[in-house]
Amino acid sequence: MGDNGSFRLGEGFVQHVPLLDIENLSVSLLQDGDEVPLVRNISFSIARGETLAIVGESGSGKSVSSLAILGLLSKALRIQSGRILFEGQDLRQLDDEALRKMRGRDMSMVFQEPMTSLNPVRSIGSQIIESIEENMGLSRSEARARAIDLLKEVGVADAERRLKQYPHHFSGGMRQRVMIAIALAAEPKLIIADEPTTALDVTIQAQILDLMARICKDHGTALILITHNLGIVARYAQRVNVMYGGRIVETGGARAIYQSPRHPYSEGLLQSVPRLDQDRTVPLKPIQGSPADPFTSISGCRFHPRCPYATDLCRQDVPTFAAGVACHFPLSTDIQATA
Amino acid sequence: MADLLRVENVSVHFPIHKGLLQRQVGEVRAVEGVSLSLRRGEAFGLVGESGCGKTTLARAVLRLVDPTSGAIWFDGTNVSGLHGKALGPYRKKVAAIFQDPFSSLNPRMTSGQILAEVLHVHAYEGDTHNRVAELLSLCGLAPRFADLYPHEMSGGQRQRVGIARALALDPELIVCDEAVSALDVSIQAQIINLLEELRVKFGLTYLFIGHDLSVVRHLCDRLAVMYLGRIMETGTSEEIFSTPRHPYTQALIDAVPAPDPDGEDRREHVALAGEIPSPLDPPAGCVFHTRCPIAFSKCRADVPPLQRLEGQHAASCFAINPNTSTTDHKVREPLSQ
């Protein structure tokens, strides 16, 4: 079962151990004998009950790193190094069976497209009940009662009747509610949500995210929210990891990063988005070029070809990650004196 | 400025056939009695959620679907009844940019061939090779991109090719259907700025369909908010975003999280309850009444007309008093009697 007690130094200490602690994680794609690095030596942690957002564009490694945490990497992807400590226990040391038991019971995932994550030929009820039976060891009738409670909790009206229905009877927003119910079934300590509302309409997006935020708060569940939407991060997250080219380039409190970003990429992202609270006649300031392609090797800092501040040092040396930012010349955090 | 495009009371209904004899058993009312006009040189936005009819309306303007009723006037000509060859001149003047450049570009053709094909089909008389290079450069792509296939380009570069294709025949109107929605945040800003530059440079008129309110507000001078096939509210970007009058517009704007944690903490959110009803069976009366926080009995019975407010602002809601600048959230039954 891998119930390794050696990391637990007594209850008092456990409080200070983060729920999830990622140390120097690297993931590569194996292709024609080559190794293409997708996630490059990232470290971060999340505390119980905390909401951490991971922001990044395509190819930044944000989804691959979360799949690695859950042990769901496809065969072509391999963890090259690093430790994934969940309550002090290294998940990489667990066998598939032990890991499978942890998924669902201790941590679960909500994906972007609820239509492809639900089985189209099985009723919603059987899929939720299976997850409850599997993870909580309840009898069928107890599991059914819990499924009805869960559906009610996630705002599915007429839950008893809807248990018998199939995924195609549900709208996109309702399917995502079902996925959240399944993710919650065993009251996990951590939920990883990968672009959970990207496929949904704005008013439905607000409903789903408000629901997830409320549920995580009520149950003390930690949430890793992977998104490209900076507005969602601002509304729902306490801390943010900004990823670029497989690395975490900046990490910090949401408020601090939005007020005074330290990495030029974070600054560029914030300046790229049109905002409802800004003058619409001012042109946007895009970041030049395209997101770093994992298949192209880039010397030094992977952001340097797009960085307005890049110097020779940036073109040669990979910046080390220190004090929450990986940049040779982090932007000043001086908060301007208010006149 | 004169109107370049005028959509008059256009409805688009799709019949639903069922059974062995393919009897018509119902219809989807995708667009219902929509009127709007685009002035030459302006960017006009159409916003709304899935099933609101914005894409169907755009396809009607592109003459890819036939309007069931109503008229579409382009530069003084009614194009809604034209078919086949008679549409040729119109097709030259109206172009489209789609959401996903990967599926709207032929994967077996280089971008040079894609652009040359458009010129060829419309019997372009100048030097095709030069024109291709010119189009690419207008869209910020070096001439070598003419030899690349779509899969060899990034999403942003592909969308630039899509824009170059739209520009090929010097159109007057470009319909942009979610043209920047599939792009990464940093690339989206590049394409938005490019679209803005091209509009100013060539005096283009845009019909810009989007679901991202911040993008539509940034690009468009005027816009219409649609819900279940009807226009809920229309006006200038300033009017709509600084004083939204329709409860749906208010909820839609509220649902957009701002990239500003402090602002988000101060805002009070009232998430709209319920789901978007099926356009197969839209609610009677005001189509929004099933989700409206202030609906009263009249809303369930009658369809509110689009009423003019100050300036260019208009909205279809019974709770709006055109003589005041706010929407009365307290009006209930008395108004209906």
Image (cartoon, grey):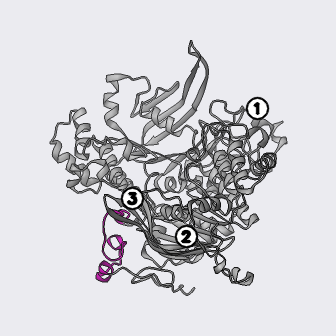
| Residue A181 seen from this side | no
Residue B249 relative to residue A217: left or right = left
Numbered disc 1: what chain? B
The mark closer to the camera, 2 or 1, is: 2
The quadrant of the image that shows the N terminus of chain A is bottom right
**Percent position of residue A23, x then y:** 52, 76
User: Looking at the picture, do discs 2 and 1 lie on one chain?
Assistant: no
Tell me the residue at 59%/52% (across/down). Answer: B240
Q: CA distance from mark 1 to mark 3?
A: 45 Å
Q: Earlier in the sequence, mark 1 or mark 3?
A: 3
Tell me the residue at 16%/40% (across/down). Answer: B126
Q: Which mark is residue B301?
A: 1
From the image, give the main secondary structure of the stretch colored magenta: loop
Q: Are marks 3 and 2 in contact (CB under 8 Å)?
A: no
| Residue B301 seen from this side | yes
Q: Which residue is mark 2?
A: A93
Give the residues in magenta. Answer: A288-316
Q: Which residue is mark 3?
A: B193
Q: Amino acid at mark 2?
A: Gln
Closest to the observer: A47 or B83?
Answer: A47
Q: Are marks 1 and 3 in contact (CB under 8 Å)?
A: no
**Percent position of residue B48, x then y:** 57, 45
Q: Secondary structure at mark 3?
A: helix
Numbered disc 2: what chain? A
Tell me the residue at 42%/30% (across/down). Answer: B63
Q: Amino acid at mark 1?
A: Ala
Q: Secondary structure at mark 2?
A: helix
Q: Secondary structure at mark 1?
A: helix
Q: Residues within 10 Å of mark 3 (few under 14, many from 20)?
A: some
Seen from this angle, which residue lies furthest front? A1
